[in-house]
Image (cartoon, coloured by chain):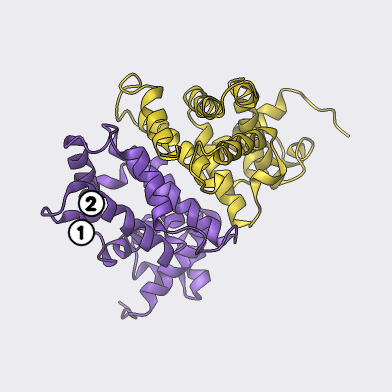
Chain colours: A yellow, B purple
Amino acid sequence: MRKKDETKEPRILDATAEIILKEGAAAVSTVKVAKHVGISQSNVYLYFKDKDDLIMSVYRRELNKIDATGDLELATDQSIPVAKRVRGYIKAVYDFALANPDSLTLIQQVKFLLGQHDTNPFEDYPEHENVVISVLQEAIDAGVIKPVPVSLLMSMVFSVIHTHTLNLQKNRYASNDYDFETFYSLIWGGMKQE
Amino acid sequence: MRKKDETKEPRILDATAEIILKEGAAAVSTVKVAKHVGISQSNVYLYFKDKDDLIMSVYRRELNKIDATGDLELATDQSIPVAKRVRGYIKAVYDFALANPDSLTLIQQVKFLLGQHDTNPFEDYPEHENVVISVLQEAIDAGVIKPVPVSLLMSMVFSVIHTHTLNLQKNRYASNDYDFETFYSLIWGGMKQE
């Protein structure tokens, strides 16, 4: 068995992410990824089991980046009022999306593919999805936010912030035209129990 | 030149839509579509110029279905207060999405592909996008909704309702567990100027 080259794994994931961003997750193949990196297909198999492993590894890498921002820790701190913790979650997604402008598009496309396979990407991993679901459910139980499916609340957060990053990428306005409070008031205004 | 068969065009579009739903818009090719329908590739060219024409025709067909619901007429009636007209727009998207559960996924995937091409799908057509942009802008100017980019408001409407239809498709809850008022209060709560 050939020896693994530690620098190759991230390069393979970068190539996979590039294909997802350009053509969607269904377009990923080990042949195509190998070609992008300039290695043989068998070399790809040294690091990843198959096409699905490639896609899910890119997905996990993006979600791990959210965890790495650290902002999400606020959401788990039980000494903080739940409304403030929901705000911490929204701020974490916002900071993450601005620092990683392609990430929400990557996540969206992988979720689309997973949706076609009729599986729930939230059920298995990662840790942080559970944190988010818990804090939103806790806020619903406390009567702080509206009693709607948590998936609707998460999709509202995701889509508003994702659209903002796409608008910035397309230069539809300048990055300092709107600040976090703009997006927070839009999202929180919808969520909060009146 | 071969004579056109009027029944073939919708069948070609159905096959294109099926491929988009399963693999994303980038996966569409005239060869693949021809194979799905069971006709020759040259026969596809009798009806559609190329792959992009196929994708955009599916996109337009979905958007025309929104217009066909008729609910959007309410949004253009200047004798009705603007807040009620915004509600009419949200209701139109809701009714449309429930009647056509795959449509918002199709629109999302085509928009994703268009986004990669750095064009704005709203600029060229269809008519109804202009209606929606006008009524939202009018509501902003009247101080009824928050002064944020119209694209953020539209994405909030789209994503909340889209997530609901995906939840229904996955049987995450029953269709009568939540009614229009649930989604409207979530969206309107976010939009409205406090």
Which of the chains bears the disc numbered 2? B
Can see residue A6? yes
Percent across and percent down for residue B156 are 39, 43
Viewer-nearest residue: B49 or A91: A91
Q: Is residue A111 left or right of residue B89?
A: right
Does A104 sit above or below residue B167? above
Q: Residue placed at 46% from the left, 73% from the top? A: B40
Residue type at the position of mark 1:
Leu
Which part of the image, by quadrant, shows the N terminus of chain B? Answer: bottom left
Q: Residue placed at 52% from the left, 24% from the top? A: A84
Q: Residue placed at 21% from the left, 54% from the top? A: B75
Viewer-nearest residue: B60 or A88: A88
Does B75 sit above or below residue A98? below
Q: Residue placed at 37% from the left, 80% from the top? A: B7
Residue type at the position of mark 2:
Lys
Q: CB under 8 Å between callouts 1 and 2?
A: yes
Q: Which mark is residue A12?
A: none
Which part of the image, by quadrant, shows the C terminus of chain B? Answer: top left
Label 1 Cα neighbours within 10 Å, binned few <14 / some 14-19 / many ≥20:
some
Tell me the element at label 1. helix
Q: Which mark is residue B84?
A: 2
Percent across and percent down for residue A40 are 72, 38
Please tell me which of labels 1 and 2 falls first in the chain: 1
Percent across and percent down for residue B45 are 37, 67
Q: Which residue is mark 1?
A: B74
Which of the chains bears the disc numbered 1? B
